[in-house]
Image (cartoon, rainbow, N blue to C red):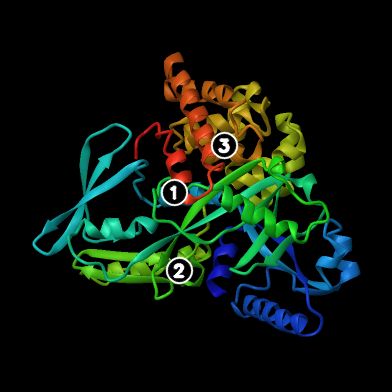
Amino acid sequence: RNADCCWSGSLRTWSSPVPFLYPLKHRGWERVYAGAGVALYDAMSVSSGHGRGLPVHRHLSRTRALRVAPGLRKDALVGALQYYDAQVDDARFVTSLVRTAARYGAHVANRARVVGFLREGARVVGARVHDLEQGGEFEVRARQVVNASGVWTDETQALIGERGQFHVRASKGIHLVVPRDRIHSSTGLILRTEKSVLFVIPWGRHWIIGTTDTGWDLDKAHPAASSADIDYLLEHVNEVLAVPLTRDDVEGVYAGLRPLLAGESDATSKLSREHTVAHPVPGLVVVAGGKYTTYRVMAKDAVDEAVHALDRRVGPCVTEDVPLAGAVGYNALWNARARMAKRTGLHVARVEHLLNRYGALTEEVLELVATDSSLGEPLAAAEDYLRAEVVYAASHEGARHLDDVLTRRTRISIETFDRGTRGAREVAELMAPVLGWGPEQIDKEVEHYEKRVEAERESQRQPDDLTADAARLGAPDIVPL
């Protein structure tokens, strides 16, 4: 919990408190049991030294719980607990993290795969890297190399030709995205299932419902959601909803993989979310496992291990005090958002949207609008986003292909029923001048994206992981991985 507080404290620009309701199904013991756990959660937040940050939990009667979540079935609860947690846009976070590293001297190589290690005797002295975008290989030499390759840890370790000290298993988690009006509630939900927990998370004009936790031994670059995965989530969330959700309510579906340290259990839901750091051979440090909210602790542990082998003094880690790009100056800009709206001619809600996505870097986006006022208009098929955001993704955030923008710089691919296909050409045409695309490349990008969406839809109609994986691989990446 200390690490979680450190994380949210350094990322306030994209982190916001979100209320969650935990419906109680049993009288007496469940309220005491669950209440004690949530109280401990609150206490750890205060004792971390970072301040409370989030409101404390509350006990609610069934009547009060139904006031904040009238979309719940009356017979689905006897009362509830309400607590708060932090929410962050992970895509925006990763982009900001990479840009912050670059500001401190890191060289960033997108779509670059490590294909081998450089050795001098038993010592690792660098890596051989394949440029997937341009082709060819290049070498990166270093006094210490850190393998932080997540679910690919085992494959990367195999490149040194020696047995790794641990094994990483991939666990698949999927989420559904539905419109906000499909669930009548002013708070998120957390539900117990027979395997784990299920979250219903408010997300702008949408709800995110998830997640699953199942082993995945197929293509790691393209984890696929199957029909069974979707049915599982709908079945469990519908147990508490007065108006059940159907497949027709689902706007988007996405899947990801967790890198879990393998243990004795076959069930990934029982594997540890902790991380470990090892030094298997001289010159190589491996960090594996872990979870999203403790990434700074993982980085500190890995770098501390690496610097031990250097023959020079290195200052203490200060990651806890380093804000991400866009964080410094955010509060002042938020207070000035009305003036920013007047200056730019944008509605104040548009400025708030930009501040929530880019923080203090919003000024860079607005510079594009000042140069070309048409960029201040919303996208025709995804009106939550401005045209300037597409151009900014290509000019400032390393987006090189259409699906980079529709999937990873924005969330258009999961926030529209058409999965972004209706606006794909407009987005490609906005990217084209920045990246030097002609009509042929625009057509290629749009065609690829449409095939990718259809492959994903087909995978979500399949009964199991094996057939879902085969369907998803029916649309190769525009830059083969």
423 horizontally vs 435: left or right:
right
Picture disc at residue 466: 1
Closer to the camera in the image, 349 or 230: 230
Q: CA distance from mark 1 to mark 2?
A: 36 Å
Q: Amino acid at mark 3?
A: Glu
Asked if 135 appears above or below 185 in the picture, the reply is above
Picture disc at residue 64: none
- Residue furthest toward the left? 121
Label 2 secondary element: helix
Q: Quadrant of residue 242?
A: bottom right
Residue 327 visible in the displayed image: no
Q: Residues within 10 Å of mark 2 (few under 14, many from 20)?
A: some
Q: Residues within 10 Å of mark 3 (few under 14, many from 20)?
A: some
Q: CA distance from mark 2 to mark 3?
A: 31 Å
User: What percent of the width, then of the height, locates residue 381?
Assistant: 66, 27
The residue where tag 3 is placed is 364
User: What percent of the width, then of the height, locates residue 55?
Assistant: 74, 69
The residue where tag 2 is placed is 297
Label 3 secondary element: helix
Camera-near label (1 vs 2) is 1
246 horizontally vs 75: left or right:
left
Do the residues bearing badges 2 and 3 touch, measured as CB atoms within 8 Å? no
Asked if 79 appears above or below 198 in the picture, the reply is below
Counting residues from the start of the chain, the first of labels 2 and 3 encountered is 2
Q: Quadrant of residue 70?
A: bottom right
Q: Amino acid at mark 1?
A: Leu
Counting residues from the start of the chain, the first of labels 1 and 3 encountered is 3
